[in-house]
Amino acid sequence: MRSLREWFGGRIQWLVGLIVLFAIIVCGIYMGLHVWQEYRTPPEERVAEALHYAVNATEYTYVSEAVRIHDGVTQVITHLKGEKSGDNVHLYGTAEVVNTEINIYQIGDTFYRQDVVSGQWQQMIGQNLEATQYLIQEIHPLGCLNMQDTFQVVAQGKEKANGVSCKKYQVQSNGESTFLTSVWKEFYYTVWIDKKHRLQQVELIADDHEDSLEQLHLTIQFDWDTKVDPIEVPT
């Protein structure tokens, strides 16, 4: 009887060991394929995928700062926070270049803007809507992520952004934003992409069309983990 138990015990240990060994081999193959796929993915494809995700994601928050540098002198243009939930967007902060507060909601195709004097919310229609849409183009930092289909990418190794380990890429593009390209040219991006292929940080440098001494510096930091409450019509 004892020898039978020992025989079964030995068989069970052998089977458990075989299962563990099989699991290790499968995990090793999976990790190897993942590393191989990551290595084989062209930098242009990796950047395009991260940009597409950022533009089309349904929920996230971000902070941005736009700075104008003229002949070595720095002037902050805007410092903004944004959040997106579904198709709705809330953008708020300061336009320091004109010393005013910004608080704008985009609910579907409708814009609401808070009057800085009365504090009342105004639904934008007619000329006010056109002015608000132009303002959104001017201050909305995510507009810079709409690049042309062709852009040049150079991988620059790994680096942390927002405390997250990322792959770092240098990107050159002419951009697609109507407002940005009407004022600026030669867009140089630095992007940090995490292991989930999401943008953690974007830095943009662009030159002025007419003044070689003037540059735009724009920094955007993303937060994909903070829960965003439903964004509704402000009251």
Image (cartoon, rainbow, N blue to C red):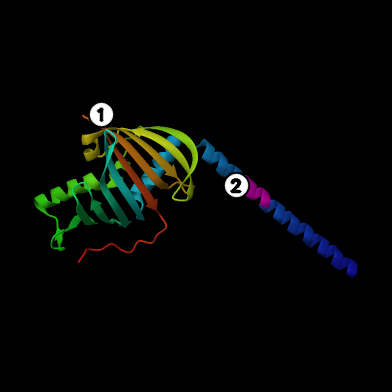
Cβ–Cβ below 8 Å for labels 1 and 2?
no
Question: Which residue position holds label 2?
Answer: 30
Q: Which mark is residue 212?
A: 1
Quadrant where the N terminus lies?
bottom right
In the rendered image, the residue lying farthest to the bottom is 1
- Observer-nearest of 34 and 104: 104
Residue 42 makes an appearance in the image: no
Is 53 on the left-hand or right-hand side of 214? right
Residue 30 part of the magenta-drawn span = yes
Q: Main secondary structure of the magenta part?
A: helix
- Image coords of residue 147 (percent x, y): 32, 38
Vertical side of 40 occupied by 228: above or below: below
Amino acid tagged 1 = Ser
- Image coords of residue 231 (percent x, y): 28, 62
- Observer-nearest of 102 and 9: 102
In the rendered image, the residue lying farthest to the front is 73
**Res 172 → quadrant:** top left
In the rendered image, the residue lying farthest to the left is 127
- Image coords of residue 213 (percent x, y): 26, 30
Please tell me how crowded label 2 is: few (under 14), some (14-19), or many (20+) other residues with Cα within 10 Å.
Answer: few
Give me the C-alpha separation between circle 1 and circle 2.
51 Å
Amino acid tagged 2 = Tyr
Vertical side of 24 occupied by 170: above or below: above
